[in-house]
Amino acid sequence: MAAMERDEVMKLVRDHLSTELEVAPERIQPDTRFREDLDADSLDLYELVMELEDRYGIRVSEEEAAQIETVGDAVDFVTARVPTA
């Protein structure tokens, strides 16, 4: 996936998390951990997964979601599964 698309996914994730968790966007970096750094709970993560599924037309199983621990993991997951044009 092109860097532009990766940046787009990162922006979507950052915007979603900063709004939902009420944290400054600059706190959300690729190595930011959802639970440890952002105090995100399972509902927060579920909502993020739903947003990514809806926006990018992908599906994330519970097992796959459980493996996503950082913002970068989420971005990598999406960019690996979104069909390229």
Image (cartoon, rainbow, N blue to C red):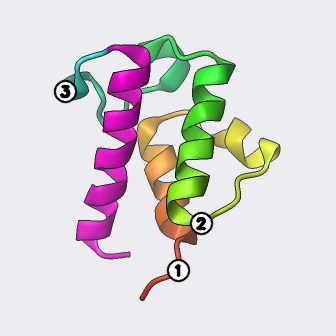
Identified by mark 3, the residue type is: Glu
Q: Which residue is drawn at 23% across and 68% down?
A: 4
Q: Is residue 16 magenta?
A: yes
Report the span colored magenta: 1-22
Q: Does the magenta stretch include residue 70?
A: no
Instruction: Give the residue at mark 3.
Output: 26
CA distance for labels 3 and 1:
29 Å
Query: How busy is the neighbourhood of tag 1: few (under 14 within 10 Å), some, or many (20 plus)?
Result: few
Give the image location of residue 25, x and y in percent: 23, 27
Identify which residue, 43 or 35, lies in the foreground.
43
Report whether residue 29 is seen. yes
Q: Is 5 left or right of 26, judged from the image as shown?
A: right
Nearest to N terminus: mark 3 or mark 2: 3
Nearest to N terminus: mark 3 or mark 1: 3
Identified by mark 2, the residue type is: Gly
Query: How busy is the neighbourhood of tag 3: few (under 14 within 10 Å), some, or many (20 plus)?
Result: few
Q: Is mark 3 on a helix, strand or loop?
A: helix
Identify which residue, 4 or 69, lies in the foreground.
4
Nearest to N terminus: mark 2 or mark 1: 2
Give the image location of residue 84, x and y in percent: 45, 84
Identify which residue, 74 or 24, lies in the foreground.
24
Q: Quadrant of residue 44?
A: top right
Instruction: Give the residue at mark 2.
Output: 57
Report whether residue 30 is seen. no
Instruction: Give the residue at mark 1.
Output: 83
Give the image location of residue 26, x and y in percent: 19, 27
Q: Do the residues labelled 3 and 2 touch (CB within 8 Å)?
A: no
